[in-house]
Image (tube, rainbow, N blue to C red):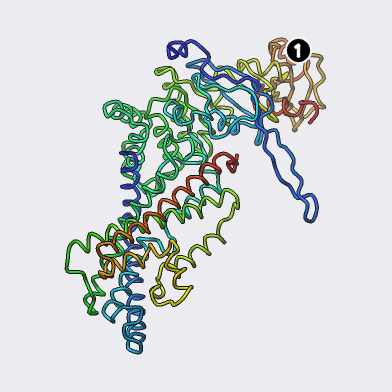
Amino acid sequence: MRLYAVVAAGGFRRYATYRMATAAGVFTNTVFGFIMAYTYTALWDERPQLGGYDLSQALTYVWLGQALLMTCAMMGGGFEDELMERIRTGDIAIDLYRPADLQMWWLSGDLGRAAFHLMGRGIVPMALGALAFDLALPSSPLTWLAFLVSVALGVVVSFAVRFLVALSAFWLMDGAGVMQICWLAGLFFSGMLLPLNLFPGTLGEVARALPWSSLLQVPADVFLGKRTGWGLVQAYAFQGGWALALLAAGRALQTAATRRVVVQGG
Amino acid sequence: MDLAEGDFMDFIELDDVEKVFDVRRKTGRLRRGKHQVRAVDGISFRVARGEMVGYIGPNGAGKSTTIKMLTGILTPSGGRLRVAGIDPSRERTRLAKRIGVVFGQRTTLWWDLPLKDSYRLVHRMYRIPDKRFRENLDRCVELLDLAELLEVPVRQLSLGQRMRGDIAAALLHDPEVLYLDEPTIGLDVISKAKVRDFLRDLNTERATTVLLTTHDLTDIEQLCKRVMVIDHGRLMYDGALAGLHEVGESERTLVVDLECELPPIVLDSARTVKVEGPRQWLAFPASQSAAPLVAALADAYPLVDLSVREPDIEAVIAKMYAERPGM
């Protein structure tokens, strides 16, 4: 396990190396946060209590989205580009002869990255949002804790989806198309554009049942106190279930990939 | 005990190993034909513990495929393969602790992080005891000149520095065998010399078995007593480096400077291969002494200067490839 701890620490620090990139990212998140906050204000003025949120909760949702955008890699931006590139160029050969498990290796690195993004890209936009708007921040430390657990589960689900996408490169050689579909799906079905609670009927039900809702919708609801007691257990079970199922699928694909592996290049 | 047995037995054993790839290729507008590429076509050899062997061949000859099978990344299509008594593809993880690999064109180091972070990772990955890790690292740092590079992110290292960093990373867990896939590719003369010195010491002091693939024949000349030549997936030569000359019927060259321009020199024991003004090149078998030839020349021609050039292994090997029947 100490190996994976070192990998996670490395994942954290490699992102921490690029300070200017982090500062620029924080700036972008903040600008988009403001744009979306004003859009939501207009929307909620017309339709108060939309999706069961009041205005302050809706604004909190916006800033949570900005804080978690990178943490849960809703639009990608984690390890998957690198892993695909390694498969495409054949560098994956190096990963395969190491006495370490491929999935655990990349999961650890991605958890390290997520931890950095939560601190580096999450806290500042959230704090600025809280200064500029009246946000519904939880008063109980337990809610904060419950939220962090939910975010961690969201990161694992996000990892598991991207791992599947990245491994498709073993068969497709160029996974750019699959990756773009994944970004779009992540952007919409995580609830990044609009909370999934807003969508009525079957679309809403399907959207809320897909794994991507673990990335933002579920943690946000935990944060806003919509999921407590038994509801919280159900939320965790939903996220944990998807995490396990997708990790298992990733493992199966990994086994198939390494069996038929055609390591590219000399 | 199989360890004691392994000490005396051949460390690497290949018996009639094959690797066949199915390659799909477009044959018609929509049709796709499958055809087979025999990357390794029945290779057998033994490498004893502590040997340092050069493994050479042109691009696509099957060198890297062999190395990948030896590490367990690829499964042989046929034949038997053992490293330290272990079947690599079945017990890849167990074997990984006993082997070190350096791919010259790829890096195992963490691109964005300081060099020492990669070593910390190796420490945990191979579960190296702390004391041994420190000793090995200190030794590598000293011999490979890494002291000033430990804090530098890998992306900022030069190619030669990165290569030395990679070699150190492959050795921290005291592997019994080291596979080097073109370890000097792209390095300048000084870096090459450093890497070679280090490998020579490693082999003599620790008796690490080394299998070296390279395009740079100087690597082989300076490091390996034994060389294996592979082409089209088959072993074409396996033996002492010196023996290559006989197999390839190599020739030495006598470069002669005459007082003036003359027609090509005619002698029984040599043939003139090139004439450029007053300078002429004469080829004669490598097994033959140059002395009688020089004496004969001095009698018949107005000599100013002369020099003997040893045969170029590269040329010898190129000749071997060219002479292979049925290509």
Task: Say if B190 sits above or below A142 in the image.
Answer: above
Outermost residue, front direction? A230
Query: Three-letter amino acid code at disc 1?
Result: Ala
Identify the image quadrant of residue B260. Answer: top right
User: Image quadrant for the N terminus of chain B?
Assistant: top left
Identify the image quadrant of residue B204. Answer: top left
Residue found at x 60% / y 50%: A171
Task: Say if B44 sits above or below A13 in the image.
Answer: above
Residue B56 makes an appearance in the image: yes
Q: Depth check: B110 or A114 in front?
A: A114
Q: x and y percent of residue B326 in the render?
A: 80, 28
Task: Say if A116 sits above or below B206 in the image.
Answer: below
**Could you classify mark 1 by the number of other residues whose Cα lies within 10 Å: few (under 14), some (14-19), or many (20 or more)?**
few
Q: x and y percent of residue A204 in the render?
A: 44, 73
Determine the chain carrying the residue at label 1.
B
Q: Depth check: B305 or B179 in front?
A: B179
Using residue A38 as the reference point, say whether residue B67 is left or right of it. Answer: right
Q: Depth check: B314 or A102 in front?
A: A102
Q: x and y percent of residue A105 in the render?
A: 40, 44
Using residue B220 as the reference point, say whether residue A244 is left or right of it. Answer: left
User: Image quadrant for the C terminus of chain B?
Assistant: top right
Q: Depth check: A214 or A4 in front?
A: A214
Outermost residue, bottom direction? A46
Task: Say if B305 sits above or below A229 in the image.
Answer: above
Query: Which residue position holds label 1?
Result: B296
